[in-house]
Image (cartoon, helix red, strand yellow):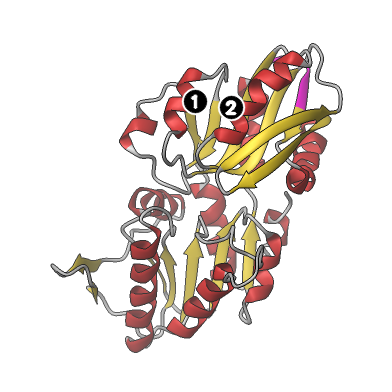
Amino acid sequence: MNSTMKIFSGSASTALTAEIADSLGTKVAQADVRRFSDGETWVELDENVRGCDVFVVQSTSNPANHNLMELLVMIDALKRASAKRINAVLPYYGYARQDRKVAPRTPISAKLVADLIVTAGAHRVLSMDLHAGQIQGFFNIPFDHLFSAPVMVEHIQKSVQGDIVIVSPDAGGVERARAYAKHLDASLAIIDKRREKANVSEVMHVIGDVKDKVAVIVDDMIDTAGTVTQAVPVLKEFGAQSVHCAATHAVLSGPAIERINMSDLEQVAVTNTIALASNAQACERVKVCSVASLLGEAIKRIHEDSSVSSLFIG
């Protein structure tokens, strides 16, 4: 594509977007994003985007509804300003946990969000570590799904010493944990748990050998931290020397930081797909790993219409 590339930022991802732009040797394009007194979102683009290849970076994290609406309004503004191609970059895809009907008369909100993004005018979507990979199929436009594994694996190699065992916090995360174990040449274990309701889980058993090993729990996100903090005493009961955690999206809602501080977790590594709240920034156990260069490289390849498949390896 020969058109000019421009990168815009939503209010939820200003710091990450600045890092991405810096990795690409460019600047963040200017837009005026405001809220009316009644809460409505208003956007005005401060520069010409006619014929441009535009990337809008916005995580739909807390407050999810406001950030999602802001993304949609920005896409609509770009469409009406005659941008050649609009690429929605969602480092964190909110509503991803609602990817199927789990009970009668419930929505599939992840599909609804996909429809909203496409209807707003996006031509392509780029996201990272989806909670459910099948969400890519909810879109009828190209979808590039990146993984934070290269960044996280590098961090684990540098900061975790000893005989490592990668632990999946549930059966659904085994594929992700196996990929980490392969890259780290480590063994694999699985937490057998039963989730009674949303944000409430009970650890039941450990499948695999963790005795005298350094356990690293890997997941796509850490929300209330109930799952990971409950896993720590169980892993130690089964003989683990110490327990670390590596989770891509730092949702860290409700009692998460309090639970982390009260646990025996050595460290919780997260990425900057979600901007940390002040209490999380103050937590010494939370270590942030930047995925800006990874996202920047994907954006560059998309703009140049070159292959990004090598960045998909989980």
Identify the magenta region: 161-165
Does residue 144 lie above or below 160 as drawn?
A: below
Q: Name the spot of residue 201 as percent of width and height, x first.
A: 63, 38
Q: Residue at x 48, y 76 (%)?
A: 117
Is residue 306 left or right of 208 when viewed as pictured?
A: left
Is residue 240 left or right of 108 when viewed as pictured?
A: right
Which amino acid is tagged 2? Answer: Thr
Whether residue 285 is visible, yes or no, is no
Q: Does the stretch in magenta take in 56? A: no
The kind of secondary structure element at disc 2 is helix
Which amino acid is tagged 1? Answer: Ile
* Disc sitting over residue 219 in the figure: none
Identify the image quadrant of the N terminus. bottom right
The kind of secondary structure element at disc 1 is helix
* Disc sitting over residue 229 in the figure: 2
Whether residue 269 is visible, yes or no, is yes
Labelled pair 1, 2 in contact (Cβ < 8 Å): yes
Does residue 289 lie above or below 71 as drawn?
A: above
Main structural element of the magenta stretch: helix, strand or loop?
loop
Q: In terms of image quadrants, where is residue 176?
A: top right
Q: Residue at x 53, y 75 (%)?
A: 112
Q: Name the spot of residue 289 as percent of width and height, x first.
A: 51, 36
Q: Which residue is mark 1?
A: 260
